[in-house]
Image (tube, rainbow, N blue to C red):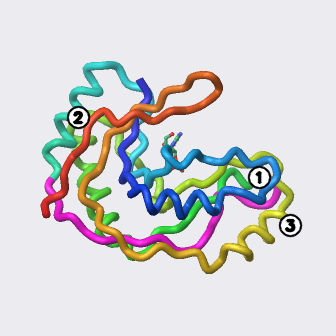
């Protein structure tokens, strides 16, 4: 099974993000119910490893905290822009939480993640979208912002593919202390 750990987003935040999901040619837009902030991609694991990951994540202790969204960015450059995303504002606590998640998974036997953490909400995956169109899109939505909302849990998701659609199923939720 293919797993990842993420911060789920409230419905009203996903509805705001859905308003950004138009106006880019050759974009595969993320469906609003699938939108999240990835904390740690785990990848393909068997059932035992998934249980170990779940047990480790259940040990993570962290306070609930506020975070907002602001701005539009992308990964990749030139003709190889891979994705567009909304940025996270005030991500200090999210970075702390992500460090705890990372330590817990490493203790559970996963290889450490060496890539830098860039908190974001993926809006679309792109293939050969003309750079000028991307520039227009970013300019149009430059002022995008979502007021801070409270993150009260994080989630272990399973990524499933079916009918050419991807579906993220919440396998477990871990409350943050109120
Ligand atoms: P994203 O947050 O940038 O979209 C489920 O597929 C989630 O895990 C996606 O949201 C995606 O990142 C992230 N993900 C998928 N494949 C990945 C990979 N090979 N390395 C890192 N993260 C990945």
User: Pointer 3: what residue?
Assistant: 132
Residue with the mark numbered 2 = 54
Q: Distance of mark 2 from mark 3, alpha carbons?
A: 44 Å
Task: Looking at the image, tell me whether mark 2 or mark 1 is earlier in sequence order.
Answer: 2
Mark 3 to mark 1: distance in Å?
Answer: 13 Å
Quarter the N terminus occupies: top left
**The magenta stretch spans residue 42:** no
Residue designated by label 1: 80
Q: Which residues are magenta?
A: 61-79
Mark 2 or mark 3: name the one nearer the start of the chain.
2
Mark 2 vs mark 1, CA separation in Å = 35 Å
- Specify whether 134 is left or right of 155: right
Within 10 Å of disc 2 (Cα), the crowding (few <14, some 14-19, many 20+) is many
Mark linked to residue 65: none
- Corner quadrant of residue 67: bottom left
Q: Residue at x 27, y 50 (%)?
A: 101
Picture quarter with the C terminus: bottom left
Task: Judge left or right: residue 45 versus residue 25.
Answer: left
- In the image, is residue 66 part of the stretch drawn in magenta? yes
């Amino acid at each position: 099974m293919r797993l990842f750990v993420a911060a789920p987003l409230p419905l009203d935040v996903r509805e705001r993000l859905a308003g950004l999901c138009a106006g880019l040619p050759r974009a595969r837009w993320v469906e609003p119910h699938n939108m999240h902030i990835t904390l740690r991609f785990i990848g393909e694991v068997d059932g035992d490893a998934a249980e170990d990951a779940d047990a480790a994540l259940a040990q993570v202790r962290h306070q609930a905290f506020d975070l907002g969204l602001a701005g539009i960015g992308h990964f990749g450059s030139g003709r190889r822009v891979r994705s567009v995303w909304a940025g996270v504002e005030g991500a200090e606590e999210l970075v702390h939480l992500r460090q705890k998640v990372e330590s817990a998974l490493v203790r559970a036997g996963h290889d450490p993640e060496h890539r830098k953490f860039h908190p974001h909400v993926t809006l679309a995956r792109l293939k050969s979208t003309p750079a000028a169109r991307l520039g227009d899109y970013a300019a149009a939505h430059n002022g995008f912002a979502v007021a801070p909302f409270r993150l009260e849990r994080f989630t272990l998701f399973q990524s499933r593919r079916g009918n050419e659609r991807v579906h993220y199923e919440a396998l477990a939720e871990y409350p943050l202390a109120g």
